Amino acid sequence: MLRHLFIVMTLITSTTNLAVASDLAREKRLHDEIVDSIMDGEPVQLTANNHSFLGIHTESATDKRKGGIIILHGRGLHPNWNTVVYPLRVALPEQGWDTLSIQMPVMAKDTKYYDYVPIFPEASPRIDAAIQYLKKQGLKNIILIAHSCGAHMAMQWLEEKGDKELVAYIGIGTGATDYKQPMRRSFPYSKMTVPILDIYGSKDYKAVINLAPKRLQLIQKAGHPQSKQEIITGADHYYKKESEDMIKTISNWLNNLKL
């Protein structure tokens, strides 16, 4: 009886300690679905932790390259997603920026915020790989733009590495979670040294809107004079009809940055 109980407890403990990993099979399906349809920019394969993942590099359309912008998509999506990600990755090169939109770790459909939390650390090596890729292209001013769950992953990376590799950070729809699933960690804004632009829509998710004052407080605590919080009137979490306003807000802020 005791031996049987010991075996059962051992199995339970072993199962509990198994590492939660992202869904690489789903990631491959996303890759196969979109890579041949990319019309703007070039697909590139990056490597992190011996895993090859997709990036889409769109070069600056101007002679003077200002730097490189890494774009992180939201939960379960891909680097060519038609809202937020695609509009930004093709519009910002017109302003002199190279963009690199990268595939973030994904899980099965219908998984929630708390399901994703354990895989946030998987994103950090991908962000590192994206930074190194842009540096190899001769780009020095690196900016990170993160939307929704991509912002959660970016915050994980910022907590681990700090912002020394960046000249600015832009968070869009930051703080999005699910019903009765509050954020596990606070925003790292107060510890950041680079300028921060925090954007959210007036029709965004309730969690994003309710946490806006907290994000602003932390941004102000960091004290960078170029940091701002902007609300896009009429926009929902995905900026389906307000992508031009989102791009204009980001472009204006970038144009005024003192790099």
Image (cartoon, rainbow, N blue to C red):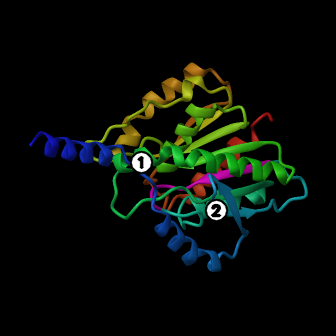
Kind of element beneath mark 2: strand
Residue at point 67%, 51% (across, down): 70
Q: Does residue 73 belong to the magenta stretch? A: yes
Give the tally of numbered discs. Answer: 2
Kind of element beneath mark 1: loop
Residue at point 62%, 47% (across, down): 125
Instruction: Please tell me which of labels 2 and 1 falls first in the chain.
Output: 1
| Residue lying furthest left | 1
Q: Is residue 136 above or below residue 175?
A: below
Q: Real-space Cα distance between discs 2 and 1?
A: 20 Å
Residue 145 position within the rendered picture, expressed as x and y whole percent measured from the top left: 62, 47
Residue at label 1?
A: 19
Q: Which residues are magenta?
A: 67-76
Q: Does residue 47 belong to the magenta stretch? A: no
- Principal SS element in the magenta part? strand
Can you see residue 202?
no
| Residue lying furthest right | 63
Badge 2 vs badge 1, beta-carbon distance below 8 Å: no
Residue at label 2?
A: 52
Residue 235 position within the rendered picture, expressed as x and y whole percent measured from the top left: 46, 53
Q: Is residue 48 above or below residue 35?
A: above
Res 5 → quadrant: top left
Can you see residue 94?
yes
Res 31 → quadrant: bottom right
Of the pair 49 and 140, the residue shown nearer to us: 49
Q: Is residue 257 above or below residue 224?
A: below
Q: Is residue 80 above or below residue 239?
A: below
**Quadrant of the snapshot with the C terminus:** top right
Q: In the displayed structure, does residue 178 sit left or right of residue 213?
A: left
At label 1, the amino acid type is Ala
Q: Residues within 10 Å of mark 2 (few under 14, many from 20)?
A: few
